[in-house]
Amino acid sequence: MSEIKYKYTNLDKTEAFSKLQKTVKPSLKELLTVDRIKECSIQAGAGLTYNYSAKAVSEETVDTLAELALEQELIQKYMAVLSGERMNTGEDRKVLHQLTRGQCIAPVTENGTDIGAFYAEQRQRIADFSDKVHRGEIKGSTGKQFDTVVQIGIGGSDLGPRALYIALEGWAEVNSKSMMDALFISNVDPDDATAVAASIDPETTLFILVSKSGTTQETLTNQAFVLDIIGKTGPAGLVPAKHMIAVTSATSPLAKSDNFLDSFYIDDYIGGRYSSTSAVGGAVLSLAFGPDVFDALLAGAHDADMRALEADIRMNAALMDAMIGLYERNVLGFPSTAVLPYSQCLSRFPAHLQQLDMESNGKSVNRDGEPVNYATGPTIFGEPGTNGQHSFYQLLHQGTDIVPLQFVGFENSQRGFDLNIDGSSSQTKLNANLAAQITAFALGSDNSNPNKQFNGERPSSLIHGSDLNPEALGALLAHFENKVMFQGFAWNINSFDQEGVQLGKLLTKKLLGDAGDEDTSILQAYFELLNK
Amino acid sequence: MSEIKYKYTNLDKTEAFSKLQKTVKPSLKELLTVDRIKECSIQAGAGLTYNYSAKAVSEETVDTLAELALEQELIQKYMAVLSGERMNTGEDRKVLHQLTRGQCIAPVTENGTDIGAFYAEQRQRIADFSDKVHRGEIKGSTGKQFDTVVQIGIGGSDLGPRALYIALEGWAEVNSKSMMDALFISNVDPDDATAVAASIDPETTLFILVSKSGTTQETLTNQAFVLDIIGKTGPAGLVPAKHMIAVTSATSPLAKSDNFLDSFYIDDYIGGRYSSTSAVGGAVLSLAFGPDVFDALLAGAHDADMRALEADIRMNAALMDAMIGLYERNVLGFPSTAVLPYSQCLSRFPAHLQQLDMESNGKSVNRDGEPVNYATGPTIFGEPGTNGQHSFYQLLHQGTDIVPLQFVGFENSQRGFDLNIDGSSSQTKLNANLAAQITAFALGSDNSNPNKQFNGERPSSLIHGSDLNPEALGALLAHFENKVMFQGFAWNINSFDQEGVQLGKLLTKKLLGDAGDEDTSILQAYFELLNK
């Protein structure tokens, strides 16, 4: 494997960024035409299309964003990721989540081992295990077939897999792919595990313990918590360890333990928030919907990954999305972005993207550890439409800050059932609302009553497709991963570590264990406040 | 009733705001002491305490905030609200949600009618109805007892009641107050109603249709949708209209219709996002947990309302919270705020606060319709801790923007069950994490590795109490309502209308109905994009 050459430059040291700051922001009211709506579409994988017609970017701005992508060598750096270079520089690790869904360029090897083959092997082991559970060849310890799976994990071991499970529940029901119900335990709050444990039958439930390091406080606590409960509430003869599998790294304290029915492995090259397409998401999704459904999701993600290699920004949806977002953040100064899926099944997808984006790009130092002089990752939030329209959209339409919007929509509903009421189906109403919102945000509406004045000029993009099936969901997931990656490279930050979560863990340990002779008086005072 | 006198002044025209901009922002590292943590506590109602020790405000800043509150006559304007003046100036309406939980000062009358008595009457009618349902005196049309209630509503008819229901589910189980399961349908996406309808037994389900105007598109569509499904899936003899009650205004098209088993009323003085303590929340919560639980919630809210009348900012939690938030928004320039409850049962409380705050204060014109020259309502988002710690906290700790934080925590868990694992209970771990986060955000930690550097100086507040019971939940709800109200008055905007949601509705109607001879080509083009 030949080393790919590239250089690391801060955004504000690039020529293209200086040029970008001088571009003229066009008026959306002047820019937006029916032709533009048709022209500003880019295939995003698995039949999805990214449309940026309602973004306030002229052809000149797009050209300059393309120059910036070229100057920051974004495609080259993405190829370095795919080639297995150690692009997580702070932790000196490869970044290989794309490899979990397929090989984009050459094989990635380490000490003679093909890492892609390792991921594929784990995927096959999970498929075989899932099939055996579904066929009843692997049963609970009292002889009953498993019908429920409970994932115990937090952060990336929870948000992504949970969002994907919820996103496919309706599709699976209609397509006879509902193999097992899935539930999730994440919070160390005892109410979380207690509520889930009360709702399941220990005899027919399979737990998945997910912790890459094998040391996550919340997850190990919830493991012990759950084992205790099912030991107590299950019938005599129930062997808790026969109701739990592990997803962890081969080097973790959990690996190859007798405490699990089976174990499946990831490695240090899969970051938590990027792990949904590894065994972390693979086990629960294969058990819930069957391994073929998980395979279809990976195929969709792989399609999006391949498309993100395209050099022409006008044909690369993830790159265009990334660069427009950077323009809005660093030139227009917008501090947050809302993700607004017009699909109830994507109800928790914004929470996953919130982690993906904010944990990846919420950084203040560049790859050399120097403070950057510009804004990096924005605040991300969102709820499904049309719900959000009756909630926070007021601020989006008329607030003093402009919030760029990412809409997502589909031609068809997922569960297929619909009714014509007052001349239109619910799905038609849903999409009419979506079209109306994009238009209202962009064009606004003048009114002599200033309370009813809409200035418009509020930019949005739209990702759309015919159906939210496993392939489309995989492509949607990968689109945002690749968007975030490109932005991180453009900002010259490391999107793949998360040192900012460590201090809290450290202080928690001091409170719960031995703080030595350190001054922990402030810490103690807050703790006492909570416990009086 | 004597008219209360006050004047409306833009924030930037006040003397106190000029003074506030000149105050020196202290360093949290220098400010924060064990004594300060003890001293900066204010009772917030029903046993809750608001603590602002980790806010970067000196005594001088607090004094100036008090001056601003005085100059903007915030308590006087709150008294005007309570007195029934038409403080929703844009819509020329009274603002009476506080009156739904008790009378704070004098009775509010209109045309000789005591409006508080009207709210109390509806509350009593709901209590009587709920008792009859629980005793089996009111049954489904096929003779079976109701065991499930489904609320059909959107925005304020959904987010608040849903958040409160989820917040009390565990408490109700432990305290033998689980009378009926509650489910919610909000989205016009047919997948929402289809999924809920598939999970219930039509014979034992009571639906609550909630729409103040009686014209909400999503809600009426879902009503028809649900009636069709239960008509089809229920047994012969099931009369759908005997399975549905309405909560609406007495003047709406839904009122006094034969299509409902019963109807309960609100009026135009209860805004959607402030309606959880009216019949909008009252019906579903009384049915789910019993009217006494709803009464307890109201009592807690009323306690917080009374405390918000206190003139001394150092003894008024809602006022202090509001003024510090304004300082952070308008002087320090922070664009968003995160709400972080360390309690799994508050999982949807941030979504309610997102509506409450962003829909109330996401405005750009003052009460006279003139554009304001300063930032108003911030972006609000949040997820429960400790989940968020493994997600977006990276950006909160090390991102380029500072995001003020509102923590919420309780001494005890709600469901009562807990285990000692590795020397501490889960609840202890939960609160150790919370104390650690407040400390880490404020004080940071120096490290020679810049990736591991935490600058600290990131402000947070904490609302804490012993238990999240109905009283505490009511106080928590009212605290934030009153905070938002005070901020709106300080910004001189109308927090009680929501004209920003109208344009989207109008354009949707044009798409679905007759647009006349208007040019709807852009609208149509987006609609076609979604449907091809």
Image (tube, coloured by chain):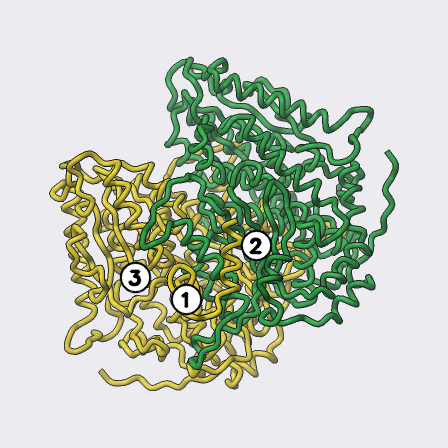
Chain colours: A yellow, B green
Mark 1 residue type: Ala
Specify whether residue A443 is in view. no
Which residue corresponds to the image point at 30% horizontal and 75% vertical from the top-left?
Answer: A93
Are the residues tagged 2 and 1 within 8 Å (C-beta)? Answer: no
Q: Are marks 2 and 3 on the same chain?
A: no
Mark 2 residue type: Leu
Looking at the image, which is closer to me, B384 or B512? Answer: B384
The answer to whether B479 is drawn above or below residue A523 in the figure is above
Residue A116 quadrant = bottom left
Chain for disc number 3: A
Residue B225 in the image, given as x and y percentages of width and height = 47, 30
Q: Quadrant of the N terminus of chain B?
A: top right
The residue that disc 1 covers is A515
Residue B49 in the image, given as x and y percentages of width and height = 60, 49
Q: Nearer the viewer, mark 1 or mark 3?
A: 1
Which residue corresponds to the image point at 20% horizontal and 65% vertical from the top-left?
Answer: A250
Residue A479 in the image, given as x and y percentages of width and height = 39, 63
Which residue corresponds to the image point at 21% horizontal and 51% vertical from the top-left?
Answer: A245
Specify whether residue A137 is in view. yes
The residue that disc 2 covers is B462
The answer to whether B135 is drawn above or below residue B415 in the figure is above
Q: Are marks 2 and 1 on the same chain?
A: no
Which residue corresponds to the image point at 35% horizontal and 79% vertical from the top-left?
Answer: A89
The residue that disc 3 covers is A215
Per the model, the C-alpha gap separating discs 2 and 1 is 24 Å
Looking at the image, which is closer to me, B211 or B103? Answer: B103
Per the model, the C-alpha gap separating discs 2 and 3 is 29 Å
